[in-house]
Amino acid sequence: MPSEIILIAAVTVDGFIARHSNEITTWTKDLSLFKKQTMGYPIIMGSNTKKTITNELKGRDIIVVKRNDRPRDVLKNISSKKCFIVGGGKTYSRFYPFLTDIYITPHPQIFGEGVSLFSDKVKSSKLRFVNLVEVSKQVGIYQYQYKIIKP
Ligand SMILES: NC(=O)c1ccc[n+]([C@@H]2O[C@H](COP(=O)([O-])OP(=O)(O)OC[C@H]3O[C@@H](n4cnc5c(N)ncnc54)[C@H](OP(=O)(O)O)[C@@H]3O)[C@@H](O)[C@H]2O)c1
């Protein structure tokens, strides 16, 4: 199992990752940062997210999970020390108990409704701030990196 299991997501200010489950994400501004950070590491995504991906994700092992895949078993089969959970809301929720880090990039948008970061109920956790990465100072977009403090 990797020692770093990192959730990476772009969210609106009201906590949504998409307007609906089939939305092709065009509103995010952090794709080049996403590419840089995930390059060379396995990335785990749900089947809905796989369907919405239009660009190739070269240089990364893409693991697409289905409902019968157990998150613990998926992670146990990864030999790399780091992997990324790249969405969507259902997959973030299912892998939540195993996360060590969260890289989250709030965007200056409000959707009002849509797919929440965690579409299923998750337990509360405290986060410890680690780092801030600038995406666009002009537009006010920064990635916040946190460690999850396990209770
Ligand atoms: N803003 C961002 O950073 C970001 C990142 C990634 C994705 N997204 C967006 O997120 C949206 C997709 O999110 P999503 O939450 O709908 O889907 P998802 O997490 O990508 O895929 C759904 C997953 O949940 C599983 N599942 C479905 N029903 C289940 C059940 N009853 N019990 C257990 N597992 C179940 C599915 O398995 P089966 O294949 O067996 O159905 C699949 O693995 C898309 O619009 C995408 O663009 C945004």
Image (cartoon, rainbow, N blue to C red):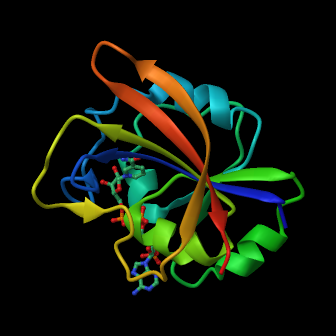
Front residue (pair 55, 88):
88
Compared with 138, 144 (above or below) is below
Expressed as whole percent of the image width and height from the top left, the position of residue 119 reads 34, 73
Expressed as whole percent of the image width and height from the top left, the position of residue 118 reads 39, 69
Front residue (pair 36, 77):
36
Q: Quadrant of the N terminus?
A: bottom right
Residue at (33% x, 33% y) in the render: 28
Q: Quadrant of the C terminus?
A: bottom right
42 on left or right of 107:
right
Residue at (50% x, 40% y) in the render: 144
Expressed as whole percent of the image width and height from the top left, the position of residue 93 reads 47, 73
103 on left or right of 17:
right
For ligand 1, the image quadrant comes to bottom left
Q: From this viewpoint, which residue is outermost toward the left? A: 112
Q: State how many labels appear.
A: 0
Name which quarter of the figure residue 137 lies in.
top left
Front residue (pair 35, 104):
104
109 on left or right of 16:
left
Compared with 62, 151 (above or below) is below
Residue at (37% x, 61% y) in the render: 117
Expressed as whole percent of the image width and height from the top left, the position of residue 90 reads 42, 71
Compared with 136, 29 (above or below) is below
Residue at (62% x, 77% y) in the render: 97
